[in-house]
């Protein structure tokens, strides 16, 4: 697996397809991310980030952020930020 580890999923809201992530690095709208876990493996572009129900464009390390996702994720899934080459 290449890419930079940027966080871990703590919650997933199935009806609205939103993952809650504790970040370990900076992430911003437009980044490509890879969700990887026991039964999770997909890539997507970050299109929406929210902290406390307020939209943000960038999140730093150590914050809890909600992200709209295209597929089901599970608690403890790892999130990686992909570089342009990946």
Image: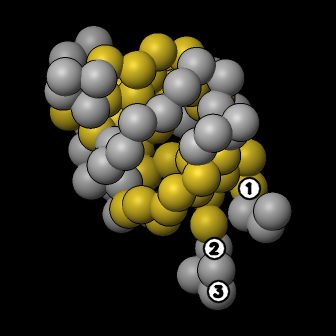
Up-down relation of residue 43 to residue 83 (above or below): above
Instruction: Report crowding for label 1: few under 14, some 14 to 19, many 20 or more residues within 10 A (C-alpha).
Output: some
Q: Quadrant of the N terminus?
A: bottom right
Depth order, front residue of 59/70: 70
In this rendering, would 1 be left or right of 8? right
Q: Quadrant of residue 7?
A: top right
Q: Position of residue 69 (x, y in %)?
A: 34, 43
Q: Is residue 65 visible?
A: no
Residues tagged 2 and 1 counted as in contact (Cβ below 8 A): yes
Compare marks 2 and 1 and give the one earlier in the sequence.
1
Depth order, front residue of 42/8: 42
Up-down relation of residue 44 to residue 66 (above or below): below
Q: Secondary structure at mark 3?
A: loop
Instruction: Report crowding for label 3: few under 14, some 14 to 19, many 20 or more residues within 10 A (C-alpha).
Output: few
Q: Which mark is residue 85?
A: 3
* Gap in angstroms between the C-alphas marked 2 and 1: 8 Å
Q: Residue tagged by mark 2?
A: 83
Q: Which mark is residue 41?
A: none
* Gap in angstroms between the C-alphas marked 3 and 2: 5 Å
Q: Quadrant of residue 85?
A: bottom right
Compare marks 3 and 1 and give the one earlier in the sequence.
1
Q: Secondary structure at mark 1?
A: strand
In this rendering, would 13 be left or right of 80? left
- Residue at screen point 64% across, 32% down: 77
Q: Is residue 42 visible?
A: yes
Q: Secondary structure at mark 2?
A: loop
Q: Which mark is residue 4?
A: 1
């Amino acid at each position: 697996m290449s890419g930079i580890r940027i966080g871990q999923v703590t919650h997933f809201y199935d009806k609205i397809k939103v993952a809650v992530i504790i970040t370990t690095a900076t992430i911003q709208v437009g980044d490509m991310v890879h969700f990887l876990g026991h039964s999770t493996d997909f890539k997507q572009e970050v299109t929406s980030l929210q902290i406390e129900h307020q939209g943000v464009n960038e999140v730093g390390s150590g914050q809890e952020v909600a992200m709209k996702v295209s597929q089901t994720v599970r608690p403890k899934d790892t999130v990686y930020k992909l570089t342009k080459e990946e």
